[in-house]
Image (cartoon, grey):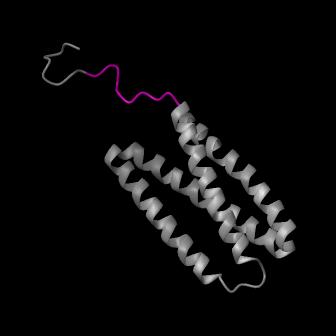
Amino acid sequence: MQANDVRALKGAAIPTIAVGLVVVVAAAFLAGGPGALGAAIGVALVVVFFTLGLMAVTWAGRVSPQMMMVAAVLGYLVKVIFLVLLLGSFKDATAFSPRALGWSVLLCTIAWTAGEIRAFLKLRMLYVDPGSEVPGQGGRT
């Protein structure tokens, strides 16, 4: 990963983990041990899935900008489908609280997305290559 990618990852992961800790404590207070376990599983799912998604988009960005967009859209689609299937399959779990799992996934996803947006807005990345020539200008810039 490049330095910009690491900064974006840290900018998204730190607020997500902070929100996750608050959610785990709140779930432990409201639902006891099973609530805390469900919330912790939700936090781990979001951090792992979104980190893998960011790494996939980063890799695809090295291939081409079009591939990066495809990876981003497919990554979000796969994450949403997988999380819906996962939450649906654990709705009757007794070892942990499925409600705490769902709330932690929802809140941590919002925190990750907001942190990622904020991190990308602060990156100061060039979107135009300063050394490139303008097409049709005959070498003049």
Q: Residue at point 65% right, 42% down?
A: 10
Image quadrant assignment for residue 6:
top right
Image quadrant in which the C terminus is located: top left
Q: Is residue 60 left or right of residue 79?
A: left
Q: Residue at x 41, y 49 (%)?
A: 60
Check if residue 34 falls in the magenta segment: no
| Foreground pick, 137 / 39 | 39
Q: Position of residue 48 (x, y in %)?
A: 63, 59
SS assignment for the magenta stretch, majority:
loop
Q: Residue 122 location, x and y as percent?
A: 55, 31
| Vertical arrangement, residue 1 with respect to residue 130, above or below | below
Residue depicted at 79% across the width and 55% down the height:
22
Q: Quadrant of the N terminus?
A: top right
Query: Number of callouts in the render?
Result: 0
Would you identify the image quadrant in which residue 109 lies?
bottom right
Q: Which residues are magenta?
A: 123-132
> Which residue occupies the foreground of this view, 57 or 81?
81
Seen in the picture, residue 5 relative to 71 is either above or below; the reply is above
Foreground of the two, 48 or 120: 120
Q: Residue furthest top?
A: 140
Res 69 visible = yes
**Above or below, comparing residue 84 to residue 51 in the picture:** below
Q: Position of residue 16 (x, y in %)?
A: 68, 51
Please indicate whether residue 128 sits to the left or right of residue 133 in the image. right
Counting from the top left corner in percent of width and height, residue 86 is at 59, 76
Can residue 47 be seen at all in this image of the molecule? no
